[in-house]
Image (tube, helix red, strand yellow):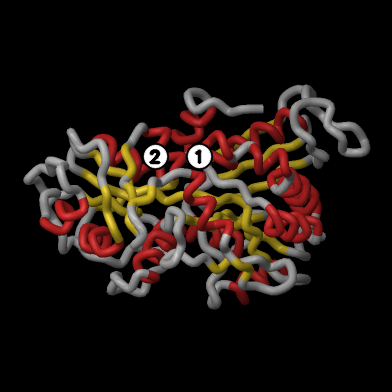
């Protein structure tokens, strides 16, 4: 079942929360889990809370809507409050799973394991995406940037749109002699972490990186939708958001020259980079190592992980988390991502994801 951008997602953006209670029985499943409607979902009943990544909010909305249509006795409440807050909520036992655009950090893993008590917390990659550098500059239909110019803009050492370093990448483009209004995330964000990971990989960023914004200057906005709305409403501005938010807001996205010519910020080009990622964990813990500096695809990408207990959930949290993530990791669930600006997980990695979900007990 498709969730239209002009209906359900508008309501989600206003509240920041998905609390979708089931209504009716259309699209339910049979006792053996086969679908009687438009999604192959083996249902569980009850309710659960989850929170975290705002980058995946549109994907979660799509999935919850489909799950609700199939499962009349389930309620899933996902609050898109940012990756940092999502991990904190999970560690504090306020949620059954967290969405995070970065895998658990070394210092977070023991705390998450302790929350699970009887088993480790695992990182399950579920949503791929392009981080688009969005801009609002009248008359500039195509903008090319590279890692050094991005670092300069977002560290406020490049402050004018017609700076020679930007102009050199955009021959024939009339760039205004105006100040750049730079927007970044004000909340702890996996999108920030992955955006700065690219700059760090290219050795042009003078900060450690992480979920919290560290550079000087600019203006903060909360959530991917907050940055997108700020850029849309501010002339001569720039920011970074996940592709689906760029599309929803109708914003232009910069092409990124990673050393082999400019690459457009599309799902297909991001998929090239994500497909080359390798698993950097053991067992059913699946953090990924992504070659951002050397890729021939679009280099500024993220993967959102669903972080939960391999063992340690109980009651409806256990049953509904496993059922819902089994659907999101299915071929049907991943196929739903393509049309809404995300990159599905595919191939051997998807097989590993499905095995990890099946291990939840």
Q: Point out which mark residue 341 bears.
A: 1
Furthest-right residue in this view: 31
On the image, which quarter does residue 27 sit in?
top right
Q: Can the viewer see residue 100 in this picture?
A: yes
Asked whether, in this view, residue 321 is left or right of residue 52, the answer is right
| Residue picked out by circle 2 | 246
At a point 92% along the width and 36% down the height, the residue shown is 31
Furthest-front residue in this view: 260
Q: Is label 1 in contact with label 2 (beta carbons under 8 Å)?
A: yes
Looking at the picture, how far across and down is residue 360, in whole percent? 78, 59
At a point 26% along the width and 63% down the height, the residue shown is 151
Residue 341's place in the image compared with 164, above or below, is above
Placement of the C terminus among the 4 image quadrants: bottom right
Viewer-proximal residue among 200 and 100: 200
Cα–Cα gap, marks 1 and 2: 9 Å
Looking at the picture, how far across and down is residue 86, in whole percent? 54, 56
On the image, which quarter does residue 45 sit in?
top right
At a point 56% along the width and 46% down the height, the residue shown is 343
At a point 18% along the width and 61% down the height, the residue shown is 156
């Amino acid at each position: 079942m498709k969730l239209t951008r002009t209906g359900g997602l508008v309501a989600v953006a206003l509240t920041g929360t998905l609390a979708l209670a089931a209504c009716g029985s259309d699209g339910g499943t049979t006792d053996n889990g086969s679908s009687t409607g438009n999604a192959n979902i083996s249902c569980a009943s009850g309710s659960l809370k989850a929170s975290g990544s705002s980058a995946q909010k549109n994907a979660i909305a799509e999935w919850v809507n489909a799950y609700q249509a199939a499962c009349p006795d389930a309620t899933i409440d996902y609050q898109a409050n940012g990756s940092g807050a999502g991990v904190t909520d999970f560690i504090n036992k306020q949620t059954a799973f967290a969405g995070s655009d970065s895998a658990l950090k070394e210092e977070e893993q023991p705390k998450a394991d302790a929350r699970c008590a009887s088993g480790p917390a695992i990182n399950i990659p579920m949503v791929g995406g392009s981080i688009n550098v969005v801009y609002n500059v009248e008359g500039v239909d195509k903008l090319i940037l590279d890692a050094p110019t991005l670092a300069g803009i977002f560290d406020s050492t490049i402050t004018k749109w017609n700076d020679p370093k930007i102009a050199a990448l955009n021959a024939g483009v009339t760039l205004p002699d105006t100040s750049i209004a730079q927007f970044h995330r004000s909340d702890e964000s996996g999108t920030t972490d992955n955006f700065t990971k690219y700059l760090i990989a290219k050795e042009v960023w003078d900060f450690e990186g992480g979920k919290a914004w560290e550079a000087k200057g600019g203006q903060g906005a909360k959530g991917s939708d907050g940055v997108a709305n700020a850029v849309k409403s501010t002339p001569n501005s720039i920011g970074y958001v996940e592709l689906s938010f760029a599309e929803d807001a109708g914003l232009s996205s910069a092409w990124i020259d990673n050393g082999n010519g400019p690459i457009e910020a599309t799902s297909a080009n991001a998929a090239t980079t994500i497909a080359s990622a390798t698993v950097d964990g053991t067992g059913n813990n699946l953090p990924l190592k992504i070659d951002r500096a050397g890729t021939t695809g679009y280099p500024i990408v993220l993967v959102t992980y669903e972080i939960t207990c391999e063992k340690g959930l109980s009651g409806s949290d256990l049953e509904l988390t496993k059922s819902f993530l089994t659907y999101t990791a299915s071929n049907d669930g991943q196929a739903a991502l393509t049309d809404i600006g995300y990159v599905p997980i595919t191939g051997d990695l998807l097989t590993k994801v499905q095995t990890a979900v099946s291990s939840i007990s």
